Image (spheres, grey):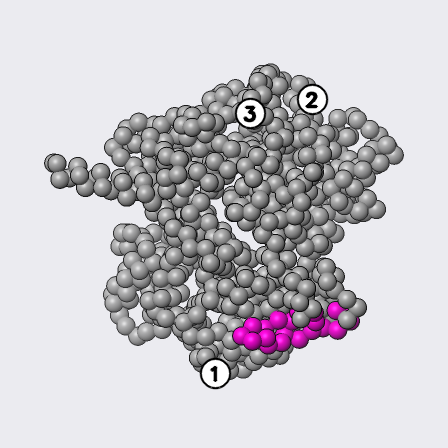
């Protein structure tokens, strides 16, 4: 079951996208009216990883962890503060306007909310057709035919070419969003929470469509979501983010069956699963995600981490390979087969010993 | 069974251009003392309108209870005056909502809002009320209650605000707590905290909880019994374990099938229900689910099935017997075929 999805290879020498030390900082005003000192929110805080051709990379994390910001920065929909993004070995951060426009043909985005991401005054034909218009690809009837082909591809009735978004249901609107993103036949697509706004019975339709299109068109997908079961289902590899950093990155089965970061393990133990007989060892994390304007020193997760020590306070861990193709940013990663509960018990024993020796 | 709430044939509608649009259309169920019952459904299923009807809050948003009975501890609620209802709301029955930011008043401190709720139902001094408020805030797991009570809603995070809402709801020691998607706006780790809190409260106070959710996972974890709603009607009522072992309604099965399971095979085609939920003014004839049902026959398109009792469960489907016989209603855990293979 482990290797059902071998549409890509890790050994591929050249990744489609190489993200190096990417940073996106937002400055906010600190203090009150008289205090004009600037504070910086590090939404994406020095992140490096590769995206390989043909893979689906899932990105999970709680709200405010920077996953959407990261996605938008990779597409240059927002300008990164620092770092490099290599797309097919060229640094796209050096691109100027015309080059950037060309790049848009190769990189596209599907948004979360199909209600606000489609212009209500355009017909569906115009919304999808605009992609061809902007890039001067097809005109008149040819454009119309291309749009209708796209509509067919995503499972929309092409005779509804002249309908407006409000005449479609949520799931159909999301199909319009997908058709728009794929109209120019891009290489790389960021799907930012594409099913979160949809009803359960419709969600699975859209997930199926995305998987089908990815396979048929050979897309590379960055799939951003907070629904862990959906991410597990669709992704080849998964990255877990916490407060602007990637804390764990590996193949999907490693993340879900053998998590190494305590945050990932805790996250997995708490998702409500559709199985009432399942008795899970739930590790409920204390507290909340700290403000990204004022993250804890050292490891950002340490304030909620049941394993944290003095070292975590003083020294920020780096994302390193702890096992084969399994990257973790933690001083005390869980060993293969070790549960978080075991690790907590071991840590408590250690702490007790220390107190006795003192 | 000791029922705390009995609903019979509830019909609630909203005034539309041509008469009332029925958001809830003939719903009957009981809630027993000390149980957690989950109403599961997609948007437009009428699950929230059901709860708003119990609280008689529909009247404030242009809705109207058109028919039916709602008995709380034997007392009929539908005929109560507004003043009488106000005494029941937030005292014997409390409600928490999805978005705790809009449910709290932004210009009053947390302390003020909790004490207000306490003083409304008890004749005690402000000082005593403040003491009780502190106790409640501690009970719902907020640290440093004294300082928190002086804060305003915007100074708190989403999870904290939901805890405050729960504290307000508990102020009157309700017998029934209605929670409408209480964790939908929250992150997974915070959701886990709130669900744990609700579980503890139910256990310690022997409260009944009516939890409204679209998340089948949440229902599986919280509920003793589950009510599946679709387009204003109840499709199935079952004990949680029974439902997940063997759903009786094709819609229940479709819903359970379409959620990717954490132990399921990855990358395979997910089972989905074709089409989408009908709008309330375009409810189909016959069984409401029939246009989307893979097993629908002519009878289903013509005649609406009633919710019928089957042992300790209830289901509204013409073909339960046949489908069970053919073993068509088992949940598919393995998923369908591999996409693209």
Q: Which x, y percent locates residue B246?
A: 57, 63
Residue located at (34% from left, 69% from top): B205
Task: Specify the segment rendered in magenta.
Answer: B300-320
Residues marked 1 and 3, same chain: no
Seen in the picture, residue B30 relative to B128 is either above or below; the reply is below
Q: Secondary structure at mark 2?
A: helix
Tag on residue A102?
2
Q: Which x, y percent locates residue A28?
A: 43, 33
Q: CA distance from mark 1 to mark 2?
A: 69 Å
> What chain does mark 1 sit on?
B
Q: Residue B321, located in which quarter of the rendered image?
A: bottom right
Q: Secondary structure at mark 3?
A: loop
Label pair 1/2, CB-CB below 8 angstroms: no
Q: Secondary structure at mark 1?
A: strand
> What chain does mark 3 sit on?
A
Q: CA distance from mark 2 to mark 3?
A: 28 Å
Q: Badge 3 is on which residue?
A: A10
Between A171 and A306, the residue placed more toward the observer is A306
| Residue B150 placement, left or right of A250 | left
Residue located at (78% from left, 30% from top): A133
Q: Is residue B108 magenta?
A: no
Q: Badge 1 is on which residue?
A: B75
Q: CA distance from mark 1 to mark 3?
A: 67 Å
């Amino acid at each position: 079951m482990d290797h059902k999805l071998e549409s890509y290879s890790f050994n591929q020498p050249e990744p489609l996208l190489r993200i190096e030390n990417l940073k996106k900082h937002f400055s906010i005003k600190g203090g009150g009216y008289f205090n004009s000192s600037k504070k910086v929110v590090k939404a994406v805080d020095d992140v490096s990883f590769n995206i390989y051709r043909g893979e689906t990379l899932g990105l999970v994390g709680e709200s405010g962890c920077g996953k959407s910001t990261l996605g938008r920065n990779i597409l240059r929909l927002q300008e990164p503060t620092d770092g490099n993004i290599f797309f097919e070995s060229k640094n796209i951060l050096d691109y100027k306007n015309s080059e950037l426009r060309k790049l848009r043909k190769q990189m596209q985005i599907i948004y979360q909310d199909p209600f606000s991401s489609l212009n209500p005054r355009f017909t569906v034909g115009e919304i999808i057709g605009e992609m061809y218009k902007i890039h001067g690809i097809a005109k008149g009837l040819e454009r119309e035919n291309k749009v209708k082909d796209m509509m067919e591809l995503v499972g929309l009735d092409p005779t509804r070419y002249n309908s407006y978004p409000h005449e479609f249901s949520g799931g159909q609107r999301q199909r319009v969003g997908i058709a728009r993103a794929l109209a120019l036949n891009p290489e790389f697509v960021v799907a930012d929470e594409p099913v979160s706004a949809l009803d359960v019975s419709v969600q699975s339709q859209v997930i199926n469509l995305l998987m089908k299109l990815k396979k048929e068109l050979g897309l590379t997908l960055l799939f951003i979501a907070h629904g862990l079961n959906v991410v597990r289902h669709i992704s080849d590899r998964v990255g877990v983010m916490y407060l602007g950093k990637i804390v764990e990155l590996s193949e999907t089965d490693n993340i879900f069956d053998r998590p190494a970061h305590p945050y990932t393990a805790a996250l997995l133990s708490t998702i409500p699963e559709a199985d009432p007989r399942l008795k899970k060892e739930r590790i409920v994390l204390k507290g909340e995600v700290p403000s990204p304007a004022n993250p804890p020193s050292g490891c950002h997760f340490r304030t909620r981490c049941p394993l944290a020590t003095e070292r975590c306070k003083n020294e920020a861990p780096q994302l390193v390979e702890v096992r084969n193709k399994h990257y973790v940013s933690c001083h005390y990663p869980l060993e293969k087969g070790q549960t978080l509960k075991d690790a907590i018990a071991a840590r408590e024993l250690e702490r007790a010993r220390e107190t006795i020796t003192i | 069974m000791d029922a705390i709430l009995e609903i019979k044939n509830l019909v609630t509608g909203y005034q539309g251009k041509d008469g009332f649009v029925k958001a809830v259309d003939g719903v009957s169920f009981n809630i027993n003392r000390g149980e957690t019952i989950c109403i599961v459904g997609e948007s437009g299923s009428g699950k929230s309108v059901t709860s708003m009807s119990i609280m008689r809050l529909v009247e404030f948003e242009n809705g109207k209870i058109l028919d039916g009975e709602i008995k709380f501890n034997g007392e009929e609620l539908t005929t109560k005056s507004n003043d009488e209802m106000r005494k029941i709301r937030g005292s014997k029955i409390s409600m928490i909502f999805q978005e705790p930011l809009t449910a709290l008043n932004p210009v009053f401190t947390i302390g003020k809002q909790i004490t207000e709720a306490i003083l409304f139902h008890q004749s005690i001094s402000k000082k005593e009320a403040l003491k009780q408020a502190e106790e409640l805030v501690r009970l719902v797991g907020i640290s440093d209650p004294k300082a928190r009570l002086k804060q305003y809603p915007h100074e708190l995070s989403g999870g904290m605000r939901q805890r405050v809402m729960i504290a307000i709801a508990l102020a009157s020691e309700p017998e029934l707590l209605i929670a409408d998607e209480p964790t939908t706006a929250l992150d997974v780790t915070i959701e886990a905290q709130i669900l744990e809190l609700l579980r503890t409260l139910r256990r310690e106070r022997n409260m009944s909880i009516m939890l409204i959710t679209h998340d089948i996972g949440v229902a599986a974890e919280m509920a003793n019994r589950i009510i599946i709603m679709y387009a204003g009607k109840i499709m199935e009522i079952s004990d949680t374990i029974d439902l997940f072992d063997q759903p009786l309604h094709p819609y229940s099965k479709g819903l359970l099938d379409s959620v990717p399971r954490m132990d399921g095979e990855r990358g395979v085609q997910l089972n989905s229900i074709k089409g989408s939920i009908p709008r309330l003014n375009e409810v189909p004839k016959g069984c409401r689910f029939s246009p989307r049902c893979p097993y629908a026959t002519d009878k289903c398109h013509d005649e609406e099935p009633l919710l019928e009792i089957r042992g300790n469960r209830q289901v509204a489907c013409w073909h339960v017997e046949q489908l069970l016989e053919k073993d068509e209603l088992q949940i598919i855990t393995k998923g369908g075929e591999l996409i693209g293979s």
